Amino acid sequence: MACISPDGKPTLSGARMLRALKTKAGSAEEVSQSAGLPLFRVRSGLRELAQAGLVSQKGEKYELSAKGSELADSLPV
Amino acid sequence: MEESKEEVMSLPRLGQAAPPFEAVTTQGPLKLDDYKGSWLILFSHPADFTPVCTTEFIAFAKIYPELQKRGVELLGLSVDSVSSHIAWARNVEEKTKVKIPFPIIADLNKEVSTAYGMIHPGQSKTETVRCVFIIDDKQVIRTILYYPLTTGRNMDEIVRIIDALQTTDANGVATPANWRPGDKVVVPPPNTQEMAEQRLKEGYECVDWYLCQKKL
């Protein structure tokens, strides 16, 4: 997994996406911009975060779930 | 006498939609769809930890910033495992100080390499040859290059093809032999007699009605 380590902790790129979504819900393109990650990685990462129940998708936009918000809040700034 | 059956597959061709895939890579699972809106160079190499492939990966890593400026992503592939790819990329970085910044598909079950016709049994039954598929932002195959196992690819030519294709798309022109950005481009030839008669009066630099060039 690219965004979540086997121990359940977000990887560096996973943490960047969670932080980007903590600021505001956004499309894959917007997350790519604010996280500074290539779009293909963000699309794949958001799929993974959604499978882990950390984000949900509404139309084109992604937002943190309650579990995702909790995890994002626990990330070091 | 034992009968041997070989499955005949239709290989991807220029102008066709790139075959979709979902693959395990060194940057996590990736689908072709993840690249929608970007150009993609999908390329295969025979095996990790081999000399020619190592020189190619270093060369691909060096042109990656130039490709990114052109909205192009790189995606490598071989039939080695992710662990092998990771170990090789780490070794390349340790020994040459060049980081491999793009993902590499671990195509252990040969699904992607089969769909793209990357295994040429006359060269090797188990390894992929050196293929380059240039896929545009609409996921249409625009260029296919095949190199034999013993010949490393020419990165200048790969960047040149990207420049030529993007220039063609942006300006509705073609590019002549050995064209480089900044050179004159070829005006599409007329396809009616009336247009042919008109062509020589249109202010282009013409050898004759069917070969006219202009500066962009």
Image (cartoon, coloured by chain):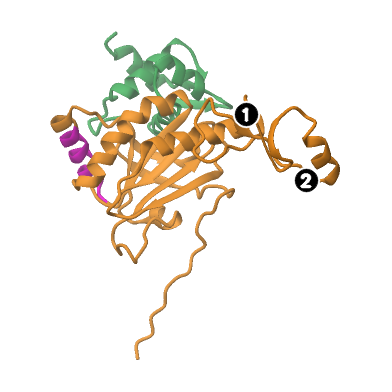
Chain colours: A green, B orange
Q: Amino acid at mark 1?
A: Ala
Q: Quadrant of the N terminus of chain B?
A: bottom left
Quadrant of the frame with the C terminus of chain B: top right
Question: Which residue sits at x=38%, y=39%?
Answer: B75
Position in image of residue B28 (x %, y %): 33, 37
Element on which disc 1 rests: helix
Mark 2 crowdedness (10 Å alpha carbons): few <14, some 14-19, many ≥20: few
Q: Amino acid at mark 2?
A: Asn
Say if A40 sits above or below B3 in the image: above
Q: Which residue is mark 1?
A: B170
The spot of residue B191 in percent (x, y) is 78, 45
Q: Find the magenta span and give its range.
A: B80-92
Q: Residues within 10 Å of mark 1 (few under 14, many from 20)?
A: few
Q: Is residue A11 left or right of A47 when viewed as pictured?
A: left
For residue A34, above or below residue B81: above
- Furthest-top residue in this view: A77
